[in-house]
Image (spheres, helix red, strand yellow):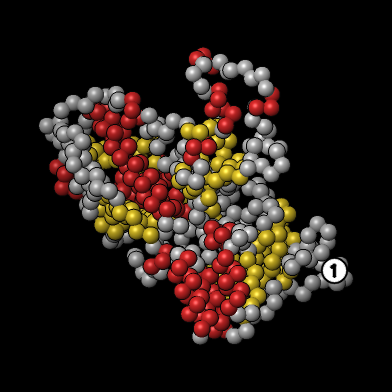
Amino acid sequence: MAEAASVPAESLAGCRARAARTVLDQVVLPGEELLLPEQEDGEGPGGAGERPLRLNAAARSRGRVVCGPGLRRCGDRLLVTKCGRLRHKEPGSGSGGGVYWVDSQQKRYVPVKGDHVIGIVTAKSGDIFKVDVGGSEPASLSYLAFEGATKRNRPNVQVGDLIYGQFVVANKDMEPEMVCIDSCGRANGMGVIGQDGLLFKVTLGLIRKLLAPDCEILQEVGKLYPMEIVFGMNGRIWVKAKTIQQTLILANILEACEHMTTDQRKQIFSRLAES
Amino acid sequence: MEGAMQTESKIRVDSGTEHGPRGPGCSLRHFACEQNLLSRPDGSASFLQGDTSVLAGVYGPAEVKVSKEIFNKATLEVILRPKTGLPGVAEKSRERLIRNTCEAVVLGALHPRTSITVVLQVVSDAGSLLACCLNAACMALVDAGVPMRALFCGVTCALHSDGTLMLDPTAKQEKEARAVLTFALDSVERKLLMSTTKGLYSDAELQQCLAAAQTASTHVFRFYRESLQRRYSKS
């Protein structure tokens, strides 16, 4: 049987660009194009590319829309580059058109400026430390980037130490650089992480979930045992409790949180609280 | 290659069946896909087409040796391991085809001087192996969160001596066929990314096979969408 060489148009239609608003909180796939609110009106029934005149200037969509992780600008549309749920955040105080991003599940970290991460010192060379942050390159950390550090007063950092710091330079073209002080010169919790404790790795999505402002998991975990926790946006968590057994229990709970439902979690917490 | 996996991290997704002819000679075998089944790689997927099964793992964007780094884009490497024996020339050739397809689709410019490695292990081969490898590689790249400009899929087509077209042939059908053609198509406009053919066929037959593959790819992409939606609906 001979199939026509030209396939009917419907099966090749692929993905027509859809309005971003209609796809919020749905799963989007790489390759889809999304229309921003401004363009939708222009795509209306006015043939030959006419746009309706707007008499009310305030009704025009305001300002820039910020294109977050998982999205790229492609002409005047947004191209989805990662698979995940599309999210939108309204602008706080009127300016700009809000932020769109794709919530995807990933294990590999890519350095982003301003992120607080946990790194492991791998080398000391001259005036800088090389810190492994889980990305494609080790980040560099200057010995002067600690609170109260001067040329005479060097910080006490050895190879193998854990460092909590933030990125000041992190783009695709340059080696990432991190520091352990904030813009005022204070440590603000950053620096070398103390002795003992356990460092383990989780997915990036879980860290974002745990660090969200209204996270119940963290409050419940905090009631179990007295402990210290440090979360790095690169998927690393450092935990320390009074005994090794408690530390291991906490680590197991946090790793398992990703896959448990709320009820299962409450069951486990109540069982632990009894024992 | 299953090893000891934590069951929590395994999200099993079974496909709807793609049985049944949509037209004479245009039926694909049953698909199944499982993502995030390996704990070490950044992304992993296992793709099953009938009895052909391939396991893929993706590492990246990761460190790259200075001799292999490219200053303005990511270095993509594909490693294909056969089920038995050492990898030979046929594997090298398939690796190159898969690499060229992935390079056309992955946004390497976002991660210069890094390496993205795709490792494929053939678990069982019952025909249409290259297409299954392409599908597994695509699902693994999506699982790893590597930025891509589109999804891609592989479809194999076999032509018999009497001119009939068979999609997704089994190993026996491939051996008896006069020509076997494999195409890689992208998800945006079903454009052709890669084609590799073996055997005798005419120009018109090539166009017919390509058209049939484009129709079949719609089903594969629908399956991708369903399985990814199911994965994200569990979180």
In this rendering, position of residue B139 left or right of residue B202: right
Front residue (pair B140, B235): B235
User: Quick check: A138 above or below B24?
Assistant: below
The picture places residue B228, in percent across and down from the top left corner, at 40, 49
Front residue (pair A209, A119): A209
User: Quick check: B35 above or below B112?
Assistant: below
Q: Secondary structure at mark 1?
A: loop
Displayed quadrant of residue B207: top left
Identify the residue at image location x=50%, y=77%: A270
The picture places residue B155, in percent across and down from the top left corner, at 29, 40
Circle 1: residue type = Gly
Q: Chain of mark 1?
A: A
Do we see residue A155 in this rendering? yes
Residue identified by numbered label 1: A148
In this rendering, position of residue B45 left or right of residue A244: left
Identify the residue at image location x=15%, y=28%: A1
The picture places residue A260, in percent across and down from the top left corner, at 45, 66
Displayed quadrant of residue B44: bottom left
Residue at the top extreme, as displayed: A48
Displayed quadrant of residue A182: bottom right
The picture places residue B172, in percent across and down from the top left corner, at 15, 47
Front residue (pair A223, B179): A223
